[in-house]
Amino acid sequence: MREILGRRRRLRFRRGSRTARLDAAVTFAVEWNWPVLPGAGLRTTPRTATGLKMLSRTVAGLRSQARTGDPGPACSCPDPGCVVPGAHPYDPGLLAATTDERMVRWWWTARPDAPVLLATGGGAPCAVSLPAAAGARALAALDATGMRLGPVVATPTRWSILVAPYDLERLGELLYAKDSVPSSLRFHSEGGYLLLPPSVAGSGQVHWERAPLTGSARPWLPDVEAVVDALVEASTSMPGGGSRLAY
């Protein structure tokens, strides 16, 4: 009987996790008007089953994984050497991103474990991402100035600060004025994408480091100009320039 009860608890947890992704995708698409699509996800094999036990690892744990040569979870896409397992568009492609509720419900009913991807840019939020340690330093610096921030997405390896939409021309002018920009900074604008909570990918669980305010019709977002200086400074001051590119 204990084994049966334990199994039931595990099944309820899995159902709850799958429902959470569907509910989140509907909220993003319908309530916030953010175009979303399902990510590639992780392959359901014994190798992945082993990898899922490692999804809550910290950055230190991931470095240990790299030293031991453990390949970790496998992406469901055809590329055996995929460097961002589960965390990218595959089928459907990025251009399929939508805010249509019927399409979103169909996708996550058919693939309840699929990660939730935001298609950034256009009228949708953009983001700037950086290594997790640099991200924590940048948020502390912005908080110290009293800067108002919007949602912040975190994985064990990277943090992403959501910002208001910007185009590449505007971004280029902004970065041109900097003495240097660390290669560890990534800019998610038009034609890009971002993994959203409560997704799970090869790097681990995705969560809100700064959650959107509950009850808001659509999360408020700062302009990229308001945060980029702190992000550049935090990345530059990290050992090695914060050049680690792992997702």
Image (cartoon, rainbow, N blue to C red):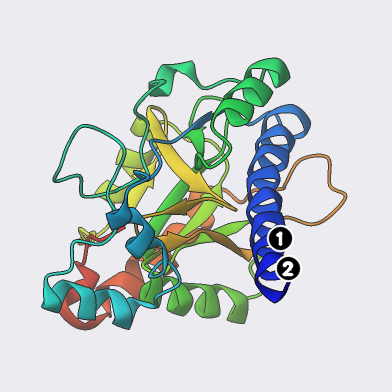
User: x, y percentage for residue 234?
Assistant: 36, 74
Q: Mark 1 is on which residue type?
A: Arg
Residue carrying label 2: 5
Q: In this view, does 219 lie to the left or right of 98?
A: right
Residue extending furthest right?
215
- Position of 208 relative to 104 (above/below): below
Q: Residue 123 occupies which quadrant of the picture?
A: top right
Residue carrying label 1: 8
Real-space Cα separation, disc 2 to disc 1, in angstroms: 5 Å
- Position of 159 relative to 76 (above/below): below
Give whichever of 146, 114 is nearer the camera. 114
Visible residue check, residue 144? yes
**Quarter of the image that includes the C terminus:** bottom left
Q: Residue 231 occupies which quadrant of the picture?
A: bottom left
User: x, y percentage for residue 71?
Assistant: 18, 61
User: x, y percentage for residue 86?
Assistant: 36, 44
Residue extending furthest front?
1
Q: Mark 2 is on which residue type?
A: Leu
